Amino acid sequence: MSDVEDSDCEDLHSSHGRDYDTFMQETAGIRRLYEAGVPFFTKEQLQDLSRQLKQAETSEKPEILIEGLEGTEETFEVRTGLTRAGSEPGTEWVLKAPAIEYRTFGKLTSYRAYRMDGYSDLSLRVLHYMELRDEVTKELLPGFRYAVDSAEIIKNSFTSCIQTWEASESYAQLQKIVESRESFPPITKIVALALGSMQPRSIDNGDHRSEFQHALALTLRGLVGKRQGQTTENVQCYAQDPAYTDIDKSILKKYDITILEDPDAFLEIDDSTIVLTFAPDVPVRQVVADIARPAMMIWNTCEDERWMHNGREQFM
């Protein structure tokens, strides 16, 4: 998955009728705000949302109030645990804990999104992910449950990935860059965003990307600490991903990685932070570009990013 928003490249070549004219009129204010450099995300906004999400966990009538960029307000009802009829007989969808939808300039001014959902000036929204389960037994169906539930197996696999990573040429190159660079900014934090769960959904997929990405965070902390003449404890390591399971959290805790709930990891980012993210399904770089100027960002480049040539995210 990528943090690249749906482009309007296709839409701009479609026929422009009355609906398109209305779309341009209604989104004109969003475009003016963006061109004026108004941030679509702020730390104050994220702090308020974090507070409301925590309060909703114990509230009898949990609701989240979010203010839009042009002053509108929208209230979201938290409905964790509610069910809907499943897509197959004998099944049901169950709503998981609330999650944050980050809506960038590209999303808010997408003609495709407008035709589906209408106009909105909310850069943040709250939604629920859903899982499909058996209506009677409540057991998650294949594809919605993890194939390995053993913490020991996952831990051993992660240890093996760390060893493989530290023996790789890529690690040697990273080590050389960190140790030989003449000017290196002071680093106090590493924030890893959307690295994914280390628990596989399938035994046969052989996908260890999440484990290697977490291995990078760990070894980078060690390299930076050594470069600064400190122990690794002097460089804090934070990780955030709604996909983390209890097994993920228990393993990462043993490596002194602090797990934060969305959006709290974003609030930790400052000019002494290294940010790591790889193919996230949230627009990490766009959010970071608005709220902070980290010392360093490491991410993967996607081919679909070629159309993004005029946004603030280009500077990140």
Image (cartoon, rainbow, N blue to C red):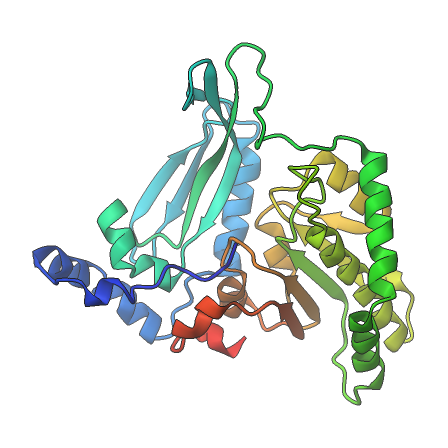
Total tally of numbered discs in the picture: 0
As drawn, the residue found furthest toward the bottom would be 182
**Residue depicted at x 25% and y 52%:** 114
Tell me: 248 left or right of 92. Answer: right
Q: Quadrant of the C terminus?
A: bottom right
**Residue depicted at x 73% and y 63%:** 190
**Residue depicted at x 35% and y 58%:** 107
As drawn, the residue found furthest toward the front would be 204
Where, by quadrant of the figure, is residue 143 drawn?
top right
Tell me: 223 left or right of 93. Answer: right
Q: Where is residue 159 in the image (x, y as percent from the top left)?
A: 86, 50
Q: Is residue 173 visible?
A: yes
Q: Position of residue 121 (x, y in %)?
A: 31, 54
Position above or below: 292 against 199: below
**Residue depicted at x 68% and y 40%:** 204
267 or 16, which is in the foreground? 16
Tell me: 121 left or right of 81. Answer: left
Q: Can residue 228 be seen in this view?
A: no
86 or 275, which is in the foreground? 86
Q: Position of residue 215 (x, y in %)?
A: 79, 58
As drawn, the residue found furthest toward the top would be 136
Q: Where is residue 105 in the image (x, y as percent from the top left)?
A: 36, 63
159 or 191, which is in the foreground? 159
As drawn, the residue found furthest toward the left would be 18
